[in-house]
Image (cartoon, coloured by chain):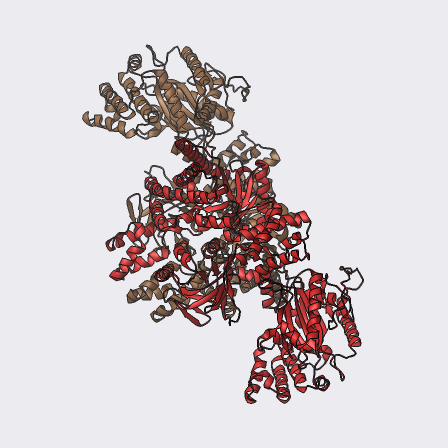
Chain colours: A brown, B red
């Protein structure tokens, strides 16, 4: 084996009159190199790099990505065919073979290879060059007519499917019929003769479906296969994958044409795949599997069970040792875990691919630490070796899919990561009842959509599945806050609450059937899988964060409404509460009754009476949060949601009123319970009280509640609500301070659009603060600020900053209003938008820097122009999303705030942003 | 009478160490002058001006507005009392009297007077200075004890009410009891003795309610009265008036203290009010009325019927002639119609007030023309003598209130101007039925709110009354488009559709009861008033517009969806269609069925089949509009509203399904009719079809439809809709062109937020255009552009302009999203916001220049940076609102577009804006 060297050649092609479309590799030398991923794709660049390093790579050539882009634009330059023919001639000369011709015909593989790995998404054709003649030559040369026939039959099948667009099923029917006829159990039970019969029938299939013959001309095969690979860039699953992984649709794929090597030539041949370290759990072990007498596709297809790669040492020790040596060097060279493919043909090893290996978060952290310990990378480099989102793995359980047949029923949005395995129930009450009967019961709450009234059920459920709603739907936001697994908006799930069942693509699931949810991928899986528990205290995680955190300049806070969540957030490293939503406090069993009384009051006096009962309850809530965050700032938002969220649904009431006279006595009693909070004490009250209640609900009804009577508009129309809340905050703050707790309250006014709104509410808060301080004989420091969540607020931020001591961007609402997208309804549009490339990302998941970001920047600058020390943060869902955190850092925000389970992610993202700047790392985060 | 001169003195007070709070007038000389309205208020400035001109004005002094502002800020400077006492002393010296003391006591009036006239909104106290002593002196001196006692009793009543905040009722009860006791029919039937008894009891009322005695010290009376006038600036009706008239809350009022003159001293005394020209119809006639032996308040109170002012010539010819001379000169001086008040005391004329007279639009135009003819003003000045909004008067009928007792039942929003008198009905069907039975029937459709399904009823009704919804609610927008009177959001009107009645403050009105609506003021009036018809062809209006229009640089277009409206708009001078809403076309009887079929289709094929049936209908609609606008541009917007607007209401369906099994055969038949468009052919279909329909409606249901699946999002998810519409447009355009009609279509894509949306829809439109041109063998010029109605669109306007050839601001939606205000729900918040001064104006009525305006400016600039010849207009409701039109002119827009009935207003506003710039007129429009 030649000494392995990785020459650094020029990566940019020099400007010539003719574009270089085709890059040759082979004979120890390649036109390209490993850095040319843009041009050659990941696979092509790897093949070139390995060839240049003298590794045993089957020779071939790469048609670069620009050709694919030309193809997409509607026409290929004639230079491409010309250069391809030249490269083919060179390959034939090197191999001493002719493509599909002669006694020793050259056969090639044609594979796609984009800049970013898209495993399995695009198409591959093997054994190209075979035809009615060359198949005989191959049989003769390999002395294995069955192998030759099987190779030809595979080519026709792959070519027919990929190039000629014939359904796989059409070929499979023929093949299965032949097996049945020959009473064959396994594919390998068919002999050469049978396979020749299959080939004859396959040709008929081609003729019938494609209205043409299978092409016998090898060059025609090559051209058609190349173009099919270009087309495969645009297939639905490739588009879907790019969307999921945020890959630019315009990149295109390269095409790699490479001399075939055969792992299926007999007992000294085989194929395998592997990793230089364990990509699942990060242990340092040679990891992978192989199959003797098999082609690469057989290893991954699951028809035969592969054996662990270490076994190769016993079977083919020379090839094994060479493989170990090569892959170890590759890892040293790339300074990262390598994911490789190889084939052994007649005892000779060929490397088919190498690339940086994908890995879990657990593995990413462990491998980064190992590599620092090994001196392979620096601590600073290690920081970028973990995707911030991958840290979820430490916080949530995972599904254990090992050795299990996983039947994916549906895929929804990965709304809240982790895993949940449980029995399905269809109402919050049913969830509570199940857990009440058996404290160890695992239930999964399945709803069309969740509402605040489902909270008690969501709290006891292991996971939540909804058929409607997006990444920031109620279910998604609440479960992320709870660190509980949620799959949202799984449109294939048809929930029938009344019948207590759900249908998924024809299958019916009844109450208490088992399902498993993967909140990290959005999969809904049939049956009961095992889970692997979370581990946030992992010492290696702590070590890793100990390297990253010192770079960080931006604080990370958490959105938390109750003491339990605050404690949790602090454990994950939150440096304060950036958003404490007081309305979530109102949904408790005891409180919601008073809240409802307050809402139904039609005069200030009754409202005040109800508020008086809420005061001590709110005060206790706040005291709990202050205690949990001792020494750290706590931002408390005054009441925000439209009041009708606290009331029964209008349509339910209408139906109940319509049916009242027909209801049985039992049904009427149930109604009394359902509406007990609304002054209905007995069955006799229903007839009169329900229409009155409906009247009030109608009054509060809004066409577009998101743009309605909410936020500071509530506090302005009902100042007594703000008064009560301010009193609860400051009474709790003073009480806590007297107990030695360090309290830093920041009172935040929501949905401000004008200076006067801010001034109005700020004046109430400050007046009540002074009153409380006087009553209690103690003053504490506090701030009053606002959320910037409406475009107008950003536009007049200079004005608003006159009264606001801090800004916190509510980027959920700011995105809604800037885009005119309701986050609860966006799923009607978003799938099309992402599929069509109109949006690259869900703007509720990753901040729209081009549009919404302008307003964030504008408000920050204008606000600080008025008040240079203005504290600015973000508390929308974006506060825990890495690219958004990076944007916040660049924009000069003081902190980001996110749900507790995103705190670690935000810390790492913020650290990476600062470290990238300090270390001048290009591009910041790793890809 | 002295020669009348109007000296020009310095209007700005010079900076002295002490602020000048009190301005004296009297003895032919005043400290202030007529230009000092900011300081002295309108009344004070007028009194100073008249005094300086030597007119017979009772002397006195004005306490300036700064004092009021100090009072509002919480404290008066001691300088004010000091300066007031000095002025009082000067007044006493001039008159040879002492305030409320001695044989000839000085009595004064204390009146408010703000910069802008706010008639009747603030408080006045007359006869101040009277007490138990001075009332006797007055009796003696006037030789009229009854007069003296009556004056004193009025003072106590006014003072008690205004200063001491005692309800008027408390005094009226006493007075009425006394009349009953004395068997008096009229107030004047009570003699001096009876009035003295009333005085004694009034004092007890004061003691009881105010816990203090009526102050006997005249100076104390004066100080308290002054402060009460300051306070009255903040009373609810004053605040309301300012809100309605867009007057700054911070201006404050001045206080005028003036020696009393008495019109009620006997048969040679009297009081009157008048105008130098008829303010109702603009004829040049001395116009007004007076009452002998009466004070000013009696003239306006309506207790006694005043006589026409010309009669004064017979009764007191000398005073009459003097009055004519003075007022004629005042008009010459101010070069405008004067609205004056006068008193004759013992045959001597006193002028109490003069000011520019308010007038109707009709009068404003006629008077402006007269004054130009008379050489009093130039044509250029005349342009500013008419408020653009006043031109409505020419386009709509008015209520004729002359000689009628007007009982205002409720006041709503003046949603669409004009008058309507008719019998009330509560459903669109009932309206149609009534008109069907009797083509001459006048009906007024009363609804809680209207929806597109009410259109057929709205079309036949004379006017619309709704209890919910704002200035841009469905009812408001549609009626303005129709030029039909509408009062919207009249919260006191409680509509019970089922019972076919409405309740207003306890009164019940049944179907076919008569009411009258004043859409110009928002009044709902009981009974059947007469109306005065509209007159848009008025030659004087044409003459006036002929002066204004040549100044105009900005085009004025109309929003019109159907040929009838387009023809109407053109008649009013529209220079194109700025917004043709294609969805309004779909609500026709024949079309909505196909539309519904299309929406309910769950696949593209069925959708296309339904669209095919819509195509010829749309094409015919477009052809009609093109024909009407021959030679002028027509902007057609592709489908915009959420699809569920075309479907039945979700809650109706739920109730119908719940009750289905209980419904009678007749009710079921009605259901079949109700749901006939949804494939329900007979009663047997209901059970199965209704839940299916509900399922589809549920699928389309949105939490916030305004932010949902609408606008270009429809065209992107269902490109076949855009295709059909584009085809209908271009087929109609080519067909018309072939007939010799000049067609300039501008296809407008709604709700664009990103360049890619614009590019997607633009590509479809352009492709279909080419297809049609090819098929028809003829090309025509057209443009494709977009509405800018989302903040994001404004932020990335430079991008969007790459694909859009024009922008049209949809400021309704832009206001909704920038403010986060749903226009259908804003009425829950807006009244409080306006009352509290948080907003100065309804941002849906007048463009929010501070916030939304920034986006308009930004988008215009950024768009033109990319495309320097970008055509920019506005088609939101603001396009017909004068201050918004002015803003558009300043921002450099090419045109405004508004509903046909606002075209005249927009033309004048645009002309005034340009003329103000050309002529360097300060402030632009007249106030």
The image shows residue A510, relative to residue B666, as above or below, that is above
Q: Can residue B22 be seen from the camera position used here?
A: yes
Q: Is residue A418 visible?
A: no
Q: Viewed as shown, does residue B116 lie left or right of B753?
A: right
Residue B227: name its quadrant: bottom right
* Residue B381 horizontal/vertical position (percent): 66, 54
Q: How many marks?
A: 0
Q: Position of residue A143 (x, y in %)?
A: 28, 13
Q: Is residue B672 above or below residue B515?
A: above
Q: Nearer the viewer, residue A93 or B598?
A: B598
Give whichever of A26, B206 is nearer the camera: B206
Image spot of residue A555 (x, y percent)? 58, 46
Residue in the image at 65% along x and 58% along y: B371
| Residue A205 quadrant | top left
Above or below, B251 against B798 in this view is below
The residue depicted at 28 percent of the width and 61 percent of the height is B667
Image height check: is B634 above or below B327?
Answer: above
The answer to which of A799 and A678 lies nearer the viewer is: A799
Apparent side of residue B194 relative to residue A878 in the rendered image (left or right): right
In which image quadrant can residue B318 be found? Answer: bottom right
Where is residue B875 drawn, in percent x and y? 52, 47
């Amino acid at each position: 084996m030649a000494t392995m060297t990785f020459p650094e050649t020029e990566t940019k092609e020099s400007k010539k009159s003719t574009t270089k479309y085709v890059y040759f590799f082979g004979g120890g030398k390649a036109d390209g190199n490993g850095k040319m991923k843009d041009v050659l794709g990941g696979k092509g660049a790897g093949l070139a790099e390995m060839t240049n390093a003298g590794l045993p790579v089957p020779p071939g050539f790469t048609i670069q990505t620009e050709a694919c882009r030309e193809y997409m634009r509607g026409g290929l330059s004639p230079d491409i065919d010309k250069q391809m023919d030249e490269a083919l001639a060179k390959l034939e000369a090197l191999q001493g073979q002719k493509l599909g011709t002669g006694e020793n015909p050259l056969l090639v593989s044609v594979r796609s290879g984009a800049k970013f790995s898209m495993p399995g998404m695009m198409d591959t054709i093997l054994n190209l060059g075979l035809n009615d003649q060359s198949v005989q030559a191959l049989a003769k040369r390999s002395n294995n007519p069955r192998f030759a026939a099987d190779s030809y039959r595979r080519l026709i099948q792959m070519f027919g499917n990929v190039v000629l667009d014939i359904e796989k099923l059409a070929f499979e029917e023929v093949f299965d019929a032949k097996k049945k006829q020959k009473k064959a159990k396994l594919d390998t039970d068919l002999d050469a003769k049978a396979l020749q019969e299959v080939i004859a029938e396959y040709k008929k299939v081609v003729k019938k479906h494609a209205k043409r013959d299978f092409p016998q001309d090898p060059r025609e095969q090559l051209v058609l296969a190349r173009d099919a690979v270009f087309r495969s860039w645009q297939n639905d699953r490739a588009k879907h994958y790019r969307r999921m992984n945020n890959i630019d649709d315009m990149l295109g794929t390269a095409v790699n044409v490479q001399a075939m090597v055969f792992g299926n030539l007999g007992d000294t041949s085989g194929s395998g795949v592997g990793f230089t370290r364990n990509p699942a759990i990060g242990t340092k072990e040679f990891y992978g599997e192989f199959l003797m007498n098999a082609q690469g596709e057989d290893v991954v297809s699951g028809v035969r069970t592969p054996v662990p790669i270490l076994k190769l040492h016993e079977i083919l020790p020379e090839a094994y040792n060479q493989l170990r040596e090569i892959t170890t060097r590759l890892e040293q060279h790339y300074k990262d875990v390598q994911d490789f493919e190889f084939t052994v043909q007649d005892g000779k090893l060929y490397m088919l691919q190498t690339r940086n290996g994908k890995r879990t978060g657990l593995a990413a952290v462990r491998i980064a630490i190992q590599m620092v310990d090994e001196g392979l990378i620096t601590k600073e480099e290690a920081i970028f070796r973990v995707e911030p989102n991958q840290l979820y793995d430490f916080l949530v359980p995972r599904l254990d899919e090992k050795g299990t047949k996983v039947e994916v029923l549906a895929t929804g949005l990965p709304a809240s990561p982790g895993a949940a395995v449980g029995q399905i129930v269809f109402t919050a009450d049913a969830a509570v009842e199940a857990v009440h009967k058996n404290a160890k019961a695992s239930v999964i709450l399945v709803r069309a959509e969740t509402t605040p009234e489902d909270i008690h059920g969501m709290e006891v459920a292991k996971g939540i599945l909804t058929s409607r709603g997006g990444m920031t739907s109620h279910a998604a936001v609440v479960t992320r806050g709870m660190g509980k697994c949620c799959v949202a908006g799984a449109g294939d799930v048809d929930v029938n609450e009344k019948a207590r069942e759900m249908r998924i693509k024809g299958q019916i699931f009844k109450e208490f059937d088992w399902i498993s949810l993967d909140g990290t991928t959005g999969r809904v899986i049939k049956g009961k899988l095992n889970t692997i528990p979370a581990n946030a205290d992992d010492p290696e995680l702590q070590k890793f964060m100990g390297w990253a955190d010192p770079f960080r300049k931006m604080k990370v806070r958490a959105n938390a409404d109750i003491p339990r969540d605050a404690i949790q957030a602090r454990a994950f490293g939150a440096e304060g509460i950036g958003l404490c939503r007081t309305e979530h406090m109102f949904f408790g069993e005891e409180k919601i009754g008073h809240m409802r009384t307050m809402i139904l009051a039609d005069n200030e006096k009754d409202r005040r009476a109800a508020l008086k009962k809420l005061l001590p309850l709110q005060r206790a809530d706040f005291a709990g949060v202050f205690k949990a965050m001792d020494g750290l700032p706590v931002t408390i938002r005054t009441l925000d949601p439209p009041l009708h969220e606290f009331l029964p649904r209008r349509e339910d009431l209408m139906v109940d009123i319509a049916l009242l006279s027909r209801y049985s006595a039992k049904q009427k009693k149930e109604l009394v319970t359902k509406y007990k909070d609304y002054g209905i004490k007995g069955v006799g009250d229903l007839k009169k009280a329900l229409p009155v209640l409906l009247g009030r609900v109608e009054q509060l009804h809004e066409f577009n509640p998101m743009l309605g009577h909410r936020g500071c508009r509530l506090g302005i129309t009902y100042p007594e609500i703000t008064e009560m809340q301010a009193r609860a905050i400051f009474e709790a703050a003073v009480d806590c301070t007297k107990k030695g707790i360090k309290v830093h309250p920041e009172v935040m006014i929501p949905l401000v659009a004008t200076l006067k709104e801010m001034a109005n509410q700020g004046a109430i808060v400050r007046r009540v603060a002074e009153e409380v301080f006087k009553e209690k004989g103690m003053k504490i420091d506090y701030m009053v600020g606002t959320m910037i969540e409406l475009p107008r607020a950003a536009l007049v931020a200079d004005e608003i900053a006159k009264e606001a001591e801090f800004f916190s961007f509510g980027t959920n609402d700011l995105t809604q209003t800037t885009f005119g997208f309701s986050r609860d309804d966006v799923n009607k549009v978003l799938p099309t938008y992402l599929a069509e490339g109109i949006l690259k990302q869900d703007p509720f998941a990753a901040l729209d820097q081009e549009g919404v970001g302008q307003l964030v920047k504008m408000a920050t600058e204008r606000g600080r122009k008025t008040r240079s020390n203005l504290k600015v943060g973000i508390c929308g869902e974006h506060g825990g999303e890495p690219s958004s955190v990076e944007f916040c850092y660049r924009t000069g925000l003081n902190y980001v705030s996110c749900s507790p389970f995103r705190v670690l992610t935000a810390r790492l993202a913020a650290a990476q942003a600062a470290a990238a700047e300090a270390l001048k790392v290009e591009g910041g985060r790793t890809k």
